[in-house]
Image (cartoon, grey):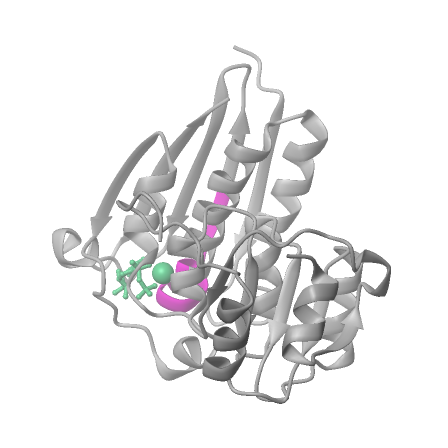
Amino acid sequence: MTVADMIQVTHAKVLLGADQLDRQISSAFCSDLMSDVLAFVTEDTVLITGLMNPHVIRTSEMLDLKCILFVRGKTPQADILEAAEEMGLVVLSTTESAFTTCGQLYAAGLRGITMRGQGGN
Amino acid sequence: MEGLIHEEYYVNKGDYVTAGSASADMKRKLRQLGVSALVLRRLAVASYEVELNLVIHSLGGKLIFDVDSTGVTLISTDKGPGIPDIEMAMREGYSTANDEARSLGFGAGMGLPNMKRNADEFSIESQPGVGTTITMRFLL
Ligand SMILES: Nc1ncnc2c1ncn2[C@@H]1O[C@H](COP(=O)(O)OP(=O)(O)O)[C@@H](O)[C@H]1O
Ligand SMILES: [Mg+2]
C-alpha cells in the first residue's frame, strides 16, 4: 500500500512528508522497544510506535527507515520533528491504540516484516 | 595500507541526549564514500548499539573508525567498569541497564548479540575495574 492508503485506513494526521503520499509501504513493524527495532528490522518498513523521544528518529536513521506512524496521539516536539524533517521522513500520528492501528493496516493487506529464521509471515 | 578515513569520537557516560550522534556522523561520511546501503545499515546499527552501551554502561570511552580499501574497523574502548561475565552479557535478554535507558526504549539486552550478528568479525575483551574493548570489522 501507499502512505496515502495508510492514512485513509488509520485516519492518521500527516505531520511530515505531505509530498510523499505515493511512497510504497511494503511491511510494518510495531514496537515501543528501540532495542528490538534495531535487532529485528532489516528491511525498509513503517515503524509503528507509541514511544516518543529523539532516539525513535535516530533509530530510524540508522536503519534507513522512511516512515514512522505514532500511535496513542503521540505528537513529537519541535526538535524531534526537525530531525525527522532533515532526514526527509514521513511522520504520521493517530489517536488510536497500537493494537487497533495494526489491525486496521493488517485488514487492509499490510503484513509484518520477515522475522529472523522465518521465511515469511 | 594507508587508511582512507580515520575518525575518533569521545562518548560520555550518561549523555543520553546526544547518544548516537557519532554513529550518525560516521554513517554520513561512509555514505559519501560510496559504501553500499546494506553494509552501511549493518555498520550503523552495530555502531549505534556500541555507542549506546558507552553512554549507558561505561564510565566513558571512545569510538575509533578506520576505513581501508577492503573494509571498516570499528573499535570501542572505555575506561570501565568492565564486564565480569562476558558469556552472560552476550546472551539475548541479559541487561543491567538503568530505568533512564529503559524509558528511552533501550536495555532489552539485545545490543551485544546484535553487534555480533551485523559485523563480519566481532571480538570483545573486558577486565573488571579496567575497561572493555570491542572490535568489529565490516567488509566492503
Ligand atoms: N561498555 C560496557 N561497559 C560495561 N558493561 C557493559 C558494556 N557494554 C555492555 N555491558 C554489559 O553487557 C550487558 C548487555 O549489553 P547489551 O547486549 O548491549 O544490552 P543492553 O545495553 O540492553 O543492556 C549490559 O547490560 C551491561 O551489563
Ligand atoms: Mg546495549
The x, y position of residue A12, in whole percent, is 70, 79
- Answer above or below: position of B97 versus A64: below
Q: Residue at x 79, y 63 (%)?
A: A85
The x, y position of residue B91, in whole percent, is 18, 56
Residue B116 quadrant: top left
Residue A90 visible in rendering: no
Q: Residue at x 51, y 22 (%)?
A: B140
Residue B60 shown in magenta: yes
User: Which range of residues does the magenta coloring cover?
Assistant: B53-63
| A117 and B129: which is toward the camera | A117
Residue A82 visible in rendering: yes
Q: Quadrant of ligand 1?
A: bottom left
Q: How many marks?
A: 0
The x, y position of residue B69, in whole percent, is 55, 14
- Answer above or below: position of A93 versus A6: below
Q: Residue at x 36, y 55 (%)?
A: B79
| A89 and A10: which is toward the camera | A10
Residue A118 shown in magenta: no
Q: Is residue A108 left or right of residue B99?
A: right
- Answer above or below: position of B39 versus A78: above
Q: Residue at x 77, y 74 (%)?
A: A14
| B42 and B133: which is toward the camera | B42
Q: Is residue A86 left or right of residue A64?
A: right
The x, y position of residue B65, in whole percent, is 52, 35
Outermost residue to the right: A19
| A70 and B121: which is toward the camera | A70
